[in-house]
Amino acid sequence: MIEAFRAEWLKTTRRPAVWILLGILLGVLVFFVYLPGWWFFAHGPHDLLPAGTDVQQLKAEYYPRLIVPHFLSTMPALMGAACLALGVLSLGSDHAWGTIHIITSLPPGRLASLGGRLTVLSAVILALDLFLWAVAGAVALTLAGIDGASLAGPPPQQLLAAIATTWLICSMWCSFGVLLAAAFRQSVVPLAVGLLYMLVIEGLVLNVLGGMGGEAVRDLEKLLPGPNAGALVQAFGHGYVPAGAQVPTALVAAWQAVAAVAAYLLLFCTGTAYFVRCRDLT
Amino acid sequence: MDLAITSHALSKRYPNGVLAVDAVQLRVPSGQVYGLLGPNGAGKTTTLRMLVGLIRPTGGGAIIAGHDAGSSESRRLVGALLDRFGFYPYLSGRNNLRVVARYCGLGEHRIELALEQVGMTRDAGRRYGTYSRGMQQRIALAAVLMREPAVVILDEPTNGLDPQGILDMRTVVREMARNGRTVLLSSHHLSEVEQVCQTVGVINRGRLVVEGPVSELRGARSLIVRAAPIEPAARVLAAIAGPHGVIRRDDSLVMTLDGVPVPDISRALISSGVDILELRQQERSLEDVFFELTSPAEARSA
């Protein structure tokens, strides 16, 4: 599998699409998650905020101390979508370009090459994860420095757990993408199906139905990957909640969410292995 | 005879019920170039893909250099250039070969050697997506050569190539055989197969209808004789080739040449007082054999 890892590493890290995804996430992190909010709370017309809102507390969310809940409130979902695309492109393009025929006829064999591919993807996701956390840290330090606020960060254990959580969630969505690519043997349809499921079905339809008070919908959500990933993120706490606003409650306990996300990761990898091993390449 | 590839009742029935390959028994001699011929949809590509391990047989099996086809051992010994090959368009030709080399655990020096062999050293740094079809084919061939496989499987290797590319491919195939490799190739170009292959198999509707050395399949050469008067000429030829060795076709006689030197035949005719108007050797081409074997019976009789 080492040979397959080395080969997959070369083709994955040289692929422009991977760098484009990284660039998009970097842009989103800096120019959507951090700068606009901080700018608004620092300079914006605060009379738009509800009465009794503590602007200083809202600004504090952009400082290193609260980097974990602030990063986790938006980035895992966006990174998950990007990683789903990464997974789809990784295997789907091999089908589209016909490279899968060459790879499969080479010595390591189907499962070893899949193992190499999945290992490389998880390593790329880890690198992406570390890089984005590092950028978030740098931005938070800069903003705190500008405002003359404390530069102290979160407890290291919390930070490490948050980094690991982001990696786990992104790896799960990525493996979902690889599974869809293996099932459809192309990139376009699995990308559409994956994002539709992730963003529309789980992100919108179930949220709306759950909000309407359907207990059955909430029970169903407890079994799905997205809500479990959300519950895992919520376990790290939340930012400032204005007085009178509803504090979000986690769907399931943290340990249950970790187990569910890990189980989905394993399930998606196993499903992919089944498709890759058993199907003919015509 | 030492065989590099043998298959035993190799069959593939697709889930939709189509029997693409029906009990094919291939016998590919070691160190030879073997041509697999057949019309479109005959089952050639499916057969080759089963040998490479891309498609799983639903019946029978194949052995390549002593190992089950598709096993990791056989994959180490087989280099394949399939009809739907592809490489990464965003990588250079060299980096594409590097991917293959890493998969196979090969050193970097093999990449440069292979590029040199196919004449792509100068363009190896360019993105694969910018290559012409001929250059893409050369990179694919380099990927095969780089591995120095004992058995090479080529599916329609000259498809889409210009005349120079076809000539180069032919040279490479001959070179591989000279170096002791076994080459199994499928092709629509019968003249090409005739030029480079020692043995051929003809596959039609999933079945291997004939297999053997090219010379055997073509059968014995024949001699066309136009002479006057024709009756004494027929008697002379029958005395040489036997009564079944000569047939009369319009105003000519067609005699099967079975090792008899043509000058001896000419001398015998002249000494019997016959005037020779035309004496011409005729050889059955592989194309004739191919169409005899693959055309429907009604078309042949027509």
Image (cartoon, rainbow, N blue to C red):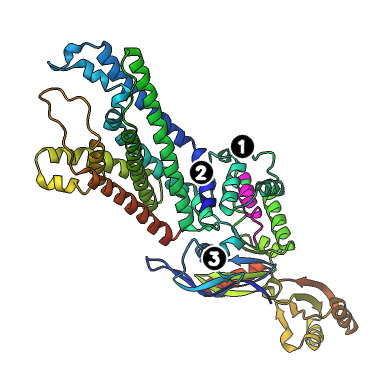
Residue type (three-letter) at the residue carrying disc 3: Leu
What is the span of residues highlighted in magenta in the rendered image? B135-149
How many neighbours does mark 3 have within 10 angstroms: few (below 14), some (14-19), or many (20 or more)? many
Closest to the camera, between mark 2 and mark 3, is 2
Between A56 and B188, the residue placed more toward the observer is A56
Above or below, B35 against B224 in this view is above
Where is residue B231? Give x, y as percent: 78, 85
Secondary structure type for disc 3: helix
Q: Tell me if label 2 and label 1 are in contact, CB under 8 Å.
A: no
In the image, residue A196 lies in the stretch drawn in magenta: no
Which residue is at 41% across, 39% downward? A126
Q: Earlier in the sequence, mark 3 or mark 1?
A: 3
The label on residue B126 is 1
Within the image, what quadrant is residue B190 found in?
bottom right
Q: Main secondary structure of the magenta part?
A: helix
Secondary structure type for disc 1: loop
